[in-house]
Amino acid sequence: MNPLAPTIKNPLASAVNEPLAAAAKQPLVEYVRRSLELEDPQEIDRRADELTVIGYEKTAGHLRARAETLRSGRLRRRNARVPYPSPLPEASDEQWARFVRMMQAGDVAAVTPSGQVGLFQTRLKRLEDLGLAREVRRVKGDGAGRWTATFRPPLTLQRLLSDPLLQYRIFVASMRRYRNEILGHHRAAIGTPIEGKPATLSGLLAVAHHAGPALASWLTSPDDRRRFARTTHAYQTTTEVF
């Protein structure tokens, strides 16, 4: 219903029909006040258009500013949402998003000298474990050599290094499998103080991501935890996230 339609008896219609009446100012103020309390930017814009038609351009501008503020707030809230839901029952979407950010340690197109690739520096050996590659090897001829593998079609190294979303999906698949292995074989470690912090699933996942099969040795050997300082740092950073 259009509150400004002259056929409808309402305060604003009276203000339009009797512009010289002093009493007409108060209904207009009330109408604008109620409009500013609305949460629907589209409705507020509609009312601003009506006010413009009857000559209240400055007041209409205030309404449009309110509508724009509401839109901006909704956009910020929408952008703040977790882009991907948690794949693990132990982690909320927010916890998972935090863990993912912590685990992003490389560049999308990077291949490290030790054979780790992409944003998450996933080991080529892990890609082999997941059935995505085989024949992981070092290619000689450029000094220290570089790591490569034979990828399962249609996956190629070039495609992997150019697609961050694909890297994320592989990371998810890897974390799911590690989660099952940890709960199946190392559940007793959860809650145990390690390197000054209680072990949680997120910390053990970080260790597994870096150490692979050496997770068991890392858990039981202080020497290994000192020797593999990068893995230990990843644990200390991520444990207690979930």
Image: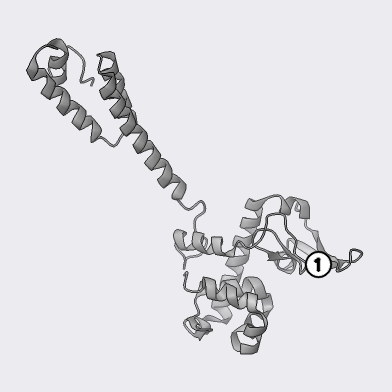
Q: Is residue 187 above or below residue 21?
A: below
Residue 217 image position (x, y, % from top left):
65, 85
- Please tell me how many numbered marks the rendered image carries: 1
In this figure, which residue is indicated by the disc labeled 1?
Answer: 136
Tell me, yes or no, if residue 221 can be seen here: no
State whether residue 40 appears in this view.
Answer: yes
Q: Residues within 10 Å of mark 1 (few under 14, many from 20)?
A: some
Q: Quadrant of the N terminus?
A: top left
- Name which residue lies at 29% across and 19% down: 57
Q: Residue 120, percent across and down?
A: 64, 62
Residue 52 vertical placement versus 38 (above, below): above
Query: Which amino acid does the dot numbered 1 rest on?
Result: Val
* The quarter of the displayed image where residue 137 is located: bottom right
Q: Position of residue 94 (x, y in %)?
A: 45, 59
Q: How is the image coloured?
A: one colour
Q: Residue furthest right?
A: 141
Judge from the rendering whether residue 20 lies leftward or rightward of residue 56; answer left or right.
Answer: left
Task: Please tell me whether mark 1 sits on a helix, a strand or a loop.
Answer: strand
| Front residue of this view, candidates 221 and 52 | 52
- Residue 90 in the image: above or below residue 200: above
Q: Residue at x 11, y 24 (%)?
A: 26
Q: Is residue 70 shown left or right of residue 228?
A: left
Residue pictured at 31% horizontal, 23% vertical: 46
x and y percentages locating residue 72 in the rendered image: 40, 39
Q: Quadrant of residue 122?
A: bottom right
Q: Is residue 52 left or right of residue 233?
A: left
Relative to the observer, which residue lies in front, 178 or 210?
210
* Residue nearer the viewer, 103 or 153: 103
Write down the quadrant of residue 71 in the picture.
top left
| Left or right of 202, for residue 165 | right
Q: Residue at x 59, y 75 (%)?
A: 233
